[in-house]
Image (tube, rainbow, N blue to C red):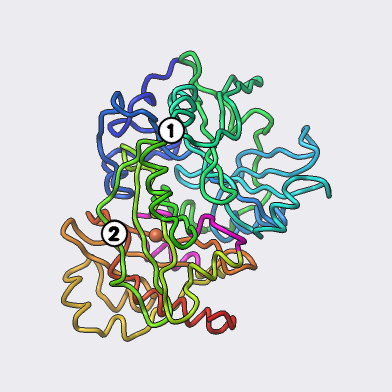
Amino acid sequence: MTDTTTTSAGRDLTASEREADLDLDQLKQLVGLVEYDESRDPFPVTGWDAIVFVVGNATQAAHYYQSAWGMELVAYAGPENGTADHKSYVLRSGSIRFVLQGAVTPDSPLVGHHARHGDGVVDIALEVPDVEVCVAQARRAGATVLQEPQELTDEHGTVRVAAIATYGETRHSLVQRVVDGVRYAGPYLPGHLPAQSTFVKREGAPKRLFQALDHIVGNVELGKMDEWVSFYHRVMGFVNMAEFIGDDIATDYSALMSKVVANGNHRVKFPLNEPAVARKKSQIDEYLEFYGGPGAQHLALATGDILRTVDELRREGVEFLDTPDAYYEDPELRARIGEVRVPIEELQRRGILVDRDEDGYLLQIFTKPLGDRPTVFFEIIERHGSLGFGKGNFKALFESIEREQERRGNL
Ligand SMILES: [Fe+2]
């Protein structure tokens, strides 16, 4: 099959988006997709390819993400089909591909990774139209190439892959799924076999709780944010997004600095946080301590109906951060956010936050940490024009996170 629709950006859908029955108008609304001229991009990125987690028990995590988060198992690799040292479960939801990996043998490299970091994101894999072009650019710009371009082939076809290093022990695999005009037809990568859930959803369970991945936030060390912003500019040709967060969001205890970079079509957005000096340990410091260094802090999942998504997730036992009632009763906030699509009381009942800027508004909520360590978590986001990240909510959010931190004795 010849594939011409994935080689240009912005105005075309990715294969994952087509499979998820999304259209361009939906994606503009969901994740703020924009058009841009890919021919002038030194490091063209089509979009997300997969988010790879290392976890302590991939077998159980795969069940949790299917049962609680409504994801679908689509592929598997493990000792049964030729991967001796680890298991790898590939789950889909909307256009997002999540991969959960856990060590099987004591000498698997995943054992050390998990000991150092706990459950977390090891690889933010990006789909690119040309791996060779990207790696040449990365090398010219001084990036660390972790894996040289190579072709992987099985009965479903061929992919070209490479990998470069980013913050901490996190990597960006670069995945070219169209080689010589033919798109790889397997469910993930060669080595993985198609798989189906044995988990049967109860009747009436939601099919899909979110449609796309909006952004992934990286936490880096004090003084390193600008270095990583510059890395994404220099190496990957990313552009700045407007939102900038400085001292104005410091609370008594927590403070951070944040800048946002995005690829040309804005499918891939990376807010980068560093701790700022505060009276007590900030939430970024807590993350860095427990993750053992820089890493992915949260993944924002875009939905068109955050109320339903949150209700369904709560029904499955997913826990969210509390938002103080004072947040909703603050007349300043009410004046600032104006009219949104549902009464404020509906948001308050669920703890959903609202933020507004000159382009529109967004609704968002954050889960508690997904694993045992106070590190990676999810955000659910519903955009209505706003291309921001909830700057106005940071203070309210911090106060809520700090209450959790205090309960853990880490404040
Ligand atoms: Fe976020």
Point out residue 313 in the picture as x, y percentages from the top left corner. 50, 65
Residue closest to the eye, 103 or 184: 103
Quadrant holding ligand 1?
A: bottom left
- Chain-order first, disc 1 or disc 2: 1
First to last magenta residue range:
291-313
- Mark in the foreground, 1 or 2: 1
Point out residue 173 in the picture as x, y percentages from the top left corner. 54, 36
Task: Identify which residue is drawn at 32% across, 59% down.
Answer: 389
The number of discs equals 2
Q: Quadrant of residue 331?
A: bottom left
Q: Residues within 10 Å of mark 1 (few under 14, many from 20)?
A: some
Asked if residue 339 lies left or right of residue 28, the reply is left
Question: Relative to residue 110, is residue 336 depicted above or below?
Answer: below
**In the structure shown, which secondary structural element does the residue marked by tag 2 occupy?**
strand
Label 2 CB sits under 8 Å from any ligand 1 atom: no
Q: Quadrant of residue 148?
A: top right
Q: Which residue is identified by label 1? A: 141
- 61 inside magenta stretch: no
Task: Identify which residue is drawn at 56% across, 30% down.
Answer: 162
Question: Relative to residue 69, is residue 162 depicted above or below?
Answer: above
Q: Which residue is identified by label 2? A: 244
Task: Identify which residue is drawn at 32% across, 72% down.
Answer: 249
Asked if residue 393 lies left or right of residue 199, the reply is left
- 293 inside magenta stretch: yes
Point out residue 280 in the picture as x, y percentages from the top left corner. 47, 80
Query: Which amino acid lies under the numbered mark 1 shown in the image of this protein?
Result: Ala
Cα distance, mark 1 to mark 2? Answer: 25 Å
Query: Which amino acid lies under the numbered mark 2 shown in the image of this protein?
Result: Phe
Q: Residues within 10 Å of mark 2 (few under 14, many from 20)?
A: some
Q: Residue furthest right?
A: 106
Label 1 CB sits under 8 Å from any ligand 1 atom: no
